[in-house]
Image: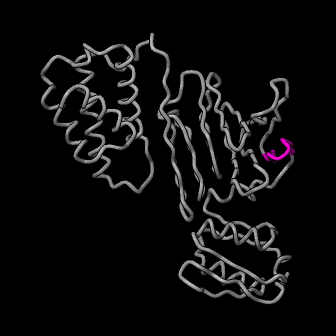
């Protein structure tokens, strides 16, 4: 393997694009060169800085990733590769000191969930994100020195580690939410007319991303919510019941006197199914109930008993709702 090959593989490893064979090649390169003078001695400062960020980002991500989907043996193998690469450089260079002369270059990662899937993520500063179904978040592998910026599509609950010197900024559908350290929820699904920001603890400021610099942000405290309408840029501040908007992060699917159509939409996203009702007389049916880690079958049975609805499975993932006008 040439130095150019190694550098290209390092880039691919950082982006999680390496095949098992390529990871083996990286380990082999380390074994063959660990007793030789470091190849980085001939690199430019920019190359050293970029490789440093690749190693730091790769090691951090492997160590901090909390998701249970990766078997421990695979995680251990990934750590061994990352550590081997790091040792190669550290042996020939004090490599954890990033060259100050080179400008910061941020590498981003994107985590996406599908219907029926949620994810827990820990960011490089220790902040935690619970990502709801059918959502996506983009974030740096390592935050910049002066800010913490992420982008969200869908819904997520954030628990942000306080840092007065590095504001935490979430951009979602042209709404910019800024905090220093707090917990809050953002619902920004594209099919909704509004983006909502609901604060559990601390203080949050929200402002339209397209607003003039002179526009004063809207500040929220615990128990308050901002409802932003992208169509006209309007932000409405209001008091809300936190459980209504935050309970999903605790495994609770909650319907607070909402139309049946909205309830079915949430169930579709939560359980990765299609639920159809063609009956016009069910349009004004409202649902009020909550379910903690309940199965779809139990929820449907409950709606049948409480609301007078009927259901049948057309396929394993397609459900038809029927029945007379629902009970109240």
Residue 236 image-quadrant placement:
top right
**In the displayed structure image, the side of residue 192 where residue 58 appears, left or right:** left
In percent of width and height, residue 327 lies at 83, 84
Residue 298 image-quadrant placement:
bottom right
In percent of width and height, residue 86 lies at 28, 28
Classified by dominant secondary structure, the portion drawn in magenta counts as: strand
Q: Is residue 235 in the magenta section? A: yes
Q: Is residue 144 in the magenta section? A: no
Q: Quick one: which residue is furthest to the top in this view?
A: 101
Quadrant showing the C terminus: bottom right
Q: Which residues are magenta?
A: 223-237
**In the displayed structure image, the side of residue 48 where residue 202 appears, left or right:** right
Quadrant showing the N terminus: top left
The colour mode here is: one colour
Q: Relative to the observer, which residue lies in front, 66 or 282?
A: 282
Does 113 appear above or below 202?
Answer: below
Q: Which residue is at 50% across, 36% downward?
A: 108
Residue 224 image-quadrant placement:
top right
**In the displayed structure image, the side of residue 72 where residue 135 appears, left or right:** right
Q: How many numbered discs?
A: 0
Q: Relative to the observer, which residue lies in front, 46 or 150?
A: 46
In percent of width and height, residue 74 lies at 29, 51
The answer, for residue 224, to whether it is visible in the render is no
Does 61 appear above or below 271?
Answer: above
Q: Which residue is at 75% across, 82% downward?
A: 278
Q: Which residue is at 25% across, 48% downward?
A: 20
In percent of width and height, residue 221 lies at 79, 39
The answer, for residue 318, to whether it is visible in the render is yes
């Amino acid at each position: 393997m040439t130095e150019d090959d190694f550098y290209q593989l390092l880039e691919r490893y950082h982006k999680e694009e390496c095949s098992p064979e390529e990871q083996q090649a990286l380990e082999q390169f380390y074994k063959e060169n660990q007793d030789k003078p470091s190849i980085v001695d001939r690199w430019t400062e920019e190359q050293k800085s970029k490789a440093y960020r690749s190693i730091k980002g790769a090691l951090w991500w492997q160590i901090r990733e909390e998701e249970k989907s990766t078997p421990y043996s695979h995680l251990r193998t990934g750590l061994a590769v990352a550590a081997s690469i790091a040792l190669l450089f550290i042996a020939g260079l004090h490599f954890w000191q990033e060259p100050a002369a080179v400008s910061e270059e941020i590498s981003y990662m994107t985590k996406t969930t599908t219907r029926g899937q949620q994810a827990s993520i820990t960011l490089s500063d220790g902040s935690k994100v619970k990502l709801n179904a059918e959502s996506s978040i983009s974030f740096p592998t390592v935050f910049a020195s002066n800010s913490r910026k992420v982008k969200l599509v869908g819904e997520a609950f954030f628990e942000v580690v306080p840092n007065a010197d590095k504001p935490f900024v979430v951009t979602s559908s042209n709404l910019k939410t800024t905090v220093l350290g707090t917990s809050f929820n953002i619902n920004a699904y594209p099919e909704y007319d509004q983006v909502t920001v609901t604060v559990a603890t601390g203080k949050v400021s929200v402002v339209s991303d397209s607003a003039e610099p002179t526009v004063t942000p809207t500040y929220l405290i615990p128990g308050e919510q901002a409802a932003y309408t992208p169509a006209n840029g309007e932000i409405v501040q209001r008091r809300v019941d936190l459980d209504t908007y935050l309970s999903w992060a605790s495994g609770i699917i909650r319907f607070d006197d909402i139309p049946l159509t909205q309830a079915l939409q949430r169930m579709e996203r939560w359980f990765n199914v299609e639920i159809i009702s063609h009956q016009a007389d069910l349009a004004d049916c409202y649902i009020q109930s909550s379910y903690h880690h309940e199965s779809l079958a139990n929820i449907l049975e409950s709606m049948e008993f409480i609301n007078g609805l009927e259901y049948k499975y057309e396929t394993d993932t397609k459900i038809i709702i029927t029945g007379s006008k629902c009970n109240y």
